[in-house]
Amino acid sequence: MKINLSGALQCSTNVQVEAHWDPIVDSTFNLHEASPIHAELFDFSPSLPTKEYEVDDFKVFLPSSAVEIGDVWQLESHELMPFLHQFHPGATTALHNGREGACACLRAISSDYAEIAFRIHAELVLSSDAYEAWRVANSLDDDEGKSRYILSQFAGHLVINLNKRSVHAFSLYLPPRNSNVDIGAFYAVDMVFVPRMELLAANTGDHNEIAWEYAITSEEARKKLELNFYKFAEIDWLPIDEAVAHAEATNLPVHAILVWGALDDESC
């Protein structure tokens, strides 16, 4: 069953969104505390702790054509900037490694509500007066030596009240997995843990109480979004002990991969 959501957001009620951003609480090399310049560079708080959005701003998450449950579509990254800039003016979806993008998936629908899950790849380009003075002193060009805050991903959901054509619930967050951010400055890098980095719509409803008529699970939606970025996510990975047992049972070789950090996001 295909569903057209192009006109699902039409009301004039604005949505207040709160920004939450915890400091780094764990790291591998303590790069963020290596010097006063590092500490200043990685001392964060949201650019806008609260911001009021028009309902039209959330249309960026809607599909351009009719979709079925589980369908995935691409999002226009530049139209997401107002949300990401609520965290930091240096936010960008143009990642330094060349991989970028954002996508969404219709997770659930009822006669009254629709839920869209999404995934966004982004990073922050950081600056401070002391850091820029160091770059000038070392004659670095605009791209050389930039400091970066590379997020594993932003995940989230948008729940739409189909009767009121309004935003029922909204969350955009950094999944709280250790480690979930890479940081870099002065040609050094580190893996760190940030417990919470989230945009959350205030005074909206509890989508967990909605009785969905058609839905896939949140884990199924997460997997569909992951597959949009990584072809290797189709592989059925196994822990080493299970892989060895399976190889012995099937007389097949073991292909082992050892990574430092996560394989299926942008922080590692």
Image (cartoon, rainbow, N blue to C red):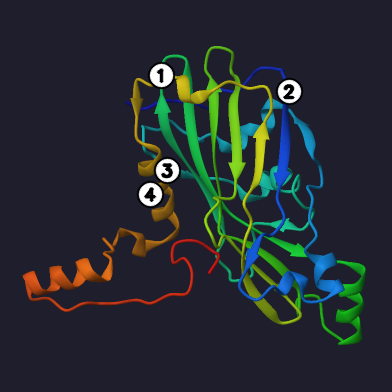
Please name the residue that numbered disc 1 is placed on.
110
Ranked by sequence position, the earlier of labels 2 and 1 is 2
Q: CA distance from mark 2 to mark 1?
A: 24 Å
Is the residue marked by circle 3 packed among few (<14), some (14-19), or many (20+) residues within 10 Å?
A: many
Residue 94 or residue 23, whichever sits in front: 23
Q: Is residue 40 above or below residue 49?
A: below
Helix, strand or loop for disc 4: helix
Mark 4, residue position: 223
Q: Residue at x 74, y 69 (%)?
A: 32
Q: Give the residue type that dot 1 points to.
A: Ser
Instruction: State which tag comes first along the sequence, 3 or 1.
Output: 3
Q: Quadrant of residue 254?
A: bottom left
Q: CA distance from mark 4 to mark 3?
A: 11 Å
Q: Between disc 4 and disc 3, whose residue precedes? A: 3
- Give the Cα separation between the discs numbered 3 and 1: 18 Å
Residue at mark 3: 72
Residue type at tag 2 = Asn
- Split into 4 quadrants, where in the image is the N terminus? top left
Label 2 – label 4 distance at C-alpha: 32 Å
* Residue drawn at point x = 73 percent, y = 43 percent: 82
Amino acid at pointer 4: Lys
Q: Secondary structure at mark 3?
A: strand
Q: Which residue is mark 2?
A: 14
User: Is the residue under label 1 in contact with that under label 4 (CB below 8 Å)?
Assistant: no
Instruction: Work out how far the residue at label 3 is from the one at label 2, CA to CA, in angstroms.
Output: 27 Å
Residue 162: x and y, percent? 52, 17
Q: Is disc 2 in contact with disc 1, using a CB cutoff of under 8 Å? A: no
The answer to which of marks 3 and 2 sits earlier in the sequence is 2
